[in-house]
Image (tube, helix red, strand yellow):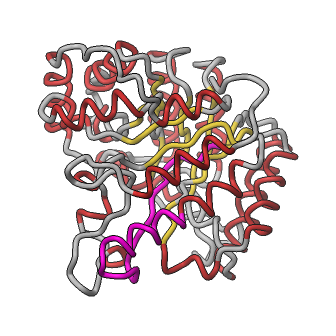
Amino acid sequence: MTPSRRAVLAAAAGAALWPRAPARAAAPGLRDIAAQRGLTYGTYIRAEMLGSDRDYTDLVIREAGLIVCSCAHWRHLAPTPTTVDYSGVETVYRWAVAHGMKYRGHALLWGEAAPAWFAELPSRAAAERALVEHVAGTCRHFAGRFQSWDVVNEAIKAGDGRPDRLRRNVFLDKIGPEYLDLAFNAARAADPATRLVYNDFDVEFDTPYQREKRRAVLDLVDGFKKRGVPLDAVGIQSHIATARMKDFDARVLSDFLQALSDRGLEIMLTELDVVDRGAPSAIAARDEEVAACYRRYLDVALANPAVSTVISWGLTDRNSWITAGRDPETRRSDGLAPRPLAFDAECRKKPAYDAIAAALAAAPRRRAPAG
């Protein structure tokens, strides 16, 4: 799902050379529809495509008010213990600003994106020092410029054999549960202005596992508050699926969002897409089913005024992790290419686009535009 460091750096060079696009078309894009309701709409982008794919680039410029990519993962920024290189992120950030977009940092800590050398550190003290230096140094470098930072991504796994339901990863192994507090405290000290976010998945449906996962997220949030750990928002990844909508209960999702809101937290839908495995083979019928999933989910989520941001995990089917086919749970049994996003592989609008646009337009107006 994430490009190599070489690809990220090559993409940065390409993006720097890409000419500034002309003014966007008069027809409002999703960014404009969202902004009219005080919301921010954005997308995950493949940085390497910005300098090589004009159709894709124009689509991002027209539709997105915010971008996020994987070039800020720790393994890309620091491939060795003595090397730190922010140039790739800087270039994509400057591209975003040049096109009137916000930039979202993802992610300071994610177990799957830790540099290989971190696991080889000789002691807990060395691991703590490296973690704090990475988080503080990165946040200090970009202080005040990003819309938000995913400080920690996917730290919870219900049923992973721990009473605290923390996911086993290299940070937990080397430091212990305290790594979470260390990261958020270091981020706030280095950047007092940018929103600090905890981001996770599998909290949208009414299943036993996800009920436990939601409880674990609330317990994590409550623990932060009790210990004075800074947290501004919770990111809900929102990887939904046509086959799972039988487990979707509007009241369950609404109650969870309200529980977060009641704790004074902002809510972001950070990685929205729809897996169409099990949906009809016929494209028209399948597209309608995918669109219905988007509309049903967004109508419930956007009814809560604490939801400020909607980020699609890609705009076009030509660059989705779902269409890449590496995850067995996304592969269709009929062998057809998945169609998970708002635009098809040729950058043509699908019913999913209209569903997202309609849900944004119908959302209650926020009191002030989302920052």
Residue 198, image quadrant: top right
* Side of 135 where 320 appears, left or right: left
Q: Is residue 114 above or below residue 369?
A: below
| Residue 158 % position (x, y) | 63, 73
Depth check, front residue: 215 or 101 = 101
Magenta extent: 268-293
131 or 351, which lies in front? 351
Residue appearing at x 62%, y 23% in the figure: 371
Identified at 60% across, 23% down, the residue is 194
Q: Which residue lies at the image location 60% right of the left edge and 38% below the top edge?
A: 309
Residue 319, compared with residue 232, is above or below; it is below
Q: Quadrant of residue 219?
A: bottom right
Q: Residue at x 54, y 39 (%)?
A: 150
Furthest toward the bottom, the residue is 333
Where residue 178 appears, as percent x and y from the top left, is 65, 48
- Left or right of 260 on screen, residue 94: left
In the image, is 292 to the left or to the right of 180? left
Magenta stretch: residue 358 in it? no
